[in-house]
Structures are given as C-alpha cells and as structure tokens.
Image: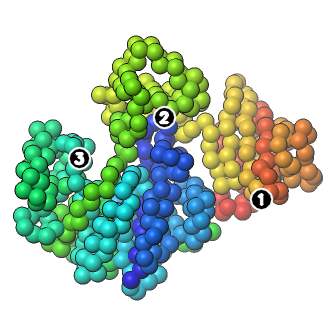
Amino acid sequence: MKIIPVILSGGSGTRLWPLSRQQYPKQYLPLVGDKTMLQNTILRLQGLDNLAEPIIVCNVEHRFLVAEQCQQIGIKTPLILLEPVGRNTAPAIAAAALQALKMADDAVLLVLSADHIIEDVGAFHQAIGRALAQAIDDKLVTFGIVPTAANTGYGYIQLATGSAGKVKSFHEKPSQKVADEYLQINAKLSAQQLEAEFLWNAGMFMFRPQVLVDELAENDSKVVAAVAAAVDNASKDLDFVRLDEQAFAKSAAISIDYALLEKSKNVVVVPLDAKWGDIGSWNALYDIYEKDDNGNVIQGDVSAIDSTNNYINASHHIVATIGIDGLIIVDTPDAILIADKNEAHKVKNIVEHLHKKGRDEGGMHRKVHRPWGWYDSIESGEHFQVKRLFVKPNAKISLQKHKQRAEHWVVVRGTALVINGTKEFSLKKGESTYIPINTVHSLANKNSEPLEIIEVQSGIYLGEDDIERLEDIYGRS
C-alpha cells in the first residue's frame, strides 16, 4: 500500500522573527544543518517502503520556494497544493485527502508538519510501521511524543489504561503544575515498566484518506463541503494545484483536533520516542544546539566576554557582548532582536507592533525571493533605491513596465539578455542600460552561470506594486 506524505507547510513563523518572516518563514530556512526544515522533513522519509511523492500544502506566496527546495533534493514531481487563505489544519488536511483520492485508490496518508526535528530516524520509521498497521485497519492514528520534560507549550494526549493506544482524552496546553503532575504519573508507570499515560500531541497523523473524509463529514460537514468544492473547482497553475479561493474561504478556520480527533471514537495513539522537537521559539532553538563552556549558543561572528546562557546569532555583523546573561540576540541585515529568554514568547508581539506601524520588516526580509532568483534592497533614500538582482540560470524577469520610476541596470556578473523598449541586446560584465519611465523591458539569463545586476531606481514612487506585467513565464499577473 502506498504511503503518501502530506506535509503541512503553511505557517508564518512569527515567533522566530527576525530570521523567520511571513514571506520567508522558518520551514524554508536551514535552522538545523545545511538543509531547510522542509527538506529535512522530506529526506527523513527516505527508506520507507512504498513511499509516494509528497503532497505539500502551502501558502500561495511560497509556491516557488517549495518547488525550488524540492528540486534541490531530487523531488521532481511533488503535488504542491496552494491554500488561497489560511484555514488551520482541518481544511488543509481535508484538501490533501480529497486530492489523494483522485490520485490513488489504495493509499495511506502520513501527515507531517514541515518544522519538526526528529533525530532518531530509525525509531521514527518503526513508529510509522506500527501506525501503518492501524491505519490499514481504518483507524485514525495520531503520534504521541513521549515527554522528556514538563513542557507547557504542547497539548497532551491521555491514554486509556490498558487500552493498547486508545485515547482517553485530549488536554490543552497545561499549567506548569499540571504538566509536572503528568510527568510524575509517567515516571511512576515507567518504574513499573509500563508505557506513559500522557504524551505530547505532535500534530502528526496517519490514516486512509477516505476514512478521514468520512469521519470529518460526520463531525463537521460544513468544512468538508467547503473544501470539496475548493478541490473540485481547483485550477492548474503551472505545476501547482490552486484551490478555489471562494469555496475554500467558506470553511471554518479549525484544527483537526477540534474538528475531528477530540470527537471521534476511532482514534488510536502510537507513542514516538525519537528525539522529537518542535522549533516554535528561540528558546527551542537554544535547547537543541550545543553550548560552549559558558552555556552560550554562538552562531556567526561573535565575541562574548563574561557572558553566559545566551543564544547569539550573528550572520551579518560582528556582535560583541560583555556581562550579559540569558538573552536572545539575533542579527539580520535590516533588523536586530534583543530579548530576555524568559520573554522570548512575546516575539510575535513585536511583529504585530511592526505591522501596525506599517513597517515592511515585520513580514519581509531585505532580500526578497522571486521565482527567477532574488533581489536585495541595499540602499534607499528620497526618490531613489539601489537593488542587487540575482537571476538564476535559464530564468527570466517578466516583460513589464513602471508608471512612476526609471531604472538603470549595471551587469556585475554574467551576461544579460535585455529587452529595452523596441531593442533587444546583450549586456556583459561592466556594461549598462537606462530604462525610462513607462518603457517596456525585460531581463533574462540564458546561461548556465548566475547573472547579477545592480539596479538603481529613481522616481516619485518606488513600491513593488508599480509593476505592469505584460508577459510572465511563471504565470504571475
């Protein structure tokens, strides 16, 4: 029986600002090792029998990021399902299940989050094998993590006594006192060589797609109706499947726990003890990294004197500290975070504050990724802006024009094929061209090496919404 991985990759990652932002959230960052969180989620499935290409559910804005990161690890034909609006996990999983039913008659879905860490892949695969047997038997399987601490950041699943995985109840994120009590109960059971009664709710599942759809319809028929309409009226967008926005928006925003699992009598739990972690905060990152002799996690160019128990990420400037303790310091090209570790859960409040002030830094990096490559806004002032453009091999910027700005391009690497008004010509390193306001233009890299351009914009308005696209090979309007 085929196992179809369903990877939920729609989060905004605001709790890891400024490294993670809405337009480039944490699941697309290499937070642990040289691969991104999404790539690691896919790669740790290698070695499973009868594994199909994944279904990846993501935000429309991130579709090209997902496609590129899949290609980088050799996943050539994933099904990338685009959510027009965020509606939490129940609609996302339902959409994947309905789409899977169109692809395979006999399959089981393995639903995973794109931002988890699982260090013991062997134990993970063994748990999947146990879950598969239950899913084939038409059970709704959830994976429960064996707790390693009295953590208040996760929901808990309570097992029924002597039930071989039957769920007694789901519990919301507990107080510290209650979490301590859960851990004490588990410790007593462990001393008797019995399985833990309380497990962390990891948000990972396994089931037949038809079983999921049928049970969800019994418990929340409106969600299934809305999502079914969104899938039936979905459109093909290059290599993506774009869910119908009007239909999908009618679904309630609800988690799969609330919509189904807490109501169903058909849920079983497979315990997972595989060094699992959820990278949901700066403290979580601090916990997983190796510390120096002073308890510091040091990444990048850092000089720390008489400093203890800090997480310091200096990726762009030298960061020097003297006599500090228990801080989070994160340096990026356009924003620096300094926070007490005990207050790090409030980072999302900073993002909300920046949005209210109309600051782009709340959701965008200085470097902005596009399907053709990226641009980095390296300088700006009144009526001018300087950008560095990186165009991937065999990529092309859309044929476009601007109503309120002119542009000057200088090639600093590679060779550019340029359309400027009625002329088409090549520019080599050191050569340049000027594009007046309202002039049709385009830029292409027809070579196997990257192309880099310095672009100087001038005009009364320099916003990204002053683009009229006439042709675009990526389907953007």
Question: In x, y percent, where is residue 200?
Answer: 23, 53
The number of numbered discs placed on residues in the rendered structure image is: 3
Mark 2 and mark 3 in contact? Answer it, CB < 8 Å.
no
Extreme residue in the bottom direction: 105
How crowded pointer 3 is (Cα within 10 Å; few <14, some 14-19, many 20+) is rated as: few
First of labels 1, 3 by sequence position: 3
Q: Is residue 317 left or right of residue 448?
A: left
Question: In x, y percent, where is residue 243?
Answer: 48, 68
Q: Quadrant of residue 405?
A: top right
Residue at which label 1 appears: 394
Mark 1 and mark 3 in contact? Answer it, CB < 8 Å.
no
Cα distance in 3D space between marks 2 and 3: 29 Å
Cα distance in 3D space between marks 1 and 3: 49 Å
Identified by mark 1, the residue type is: Asn
Question: In x, y percent, where is residue 469?
Answer: 72, 55
First of labels 2, 1 by sequence position: 2
**Image height check: is 76 above or below 387?**
below
Rendered residue at 77%/59% (across/down): 394
* Residue 25 at least partly seen: no
Q: Is residue 325 left or right of residue 38?
A: left
Mark 2 and mark 1 in contact? Answer it, CB < 8 Å.
no
Residue at which label 2 appears: 18
How crowded pointer 2 is (Cα within 10 Å; few <14, some 14-19, many 20+) is rated as: many
**Image height check: is 476 above or below 228?**
above
Helix, strand or loop at label 2? It is loop
Residue at which label 3 appears: 148
Identified by mark 2, the residue type is: Pro
Identified by mark 3, the residue type is: Thr
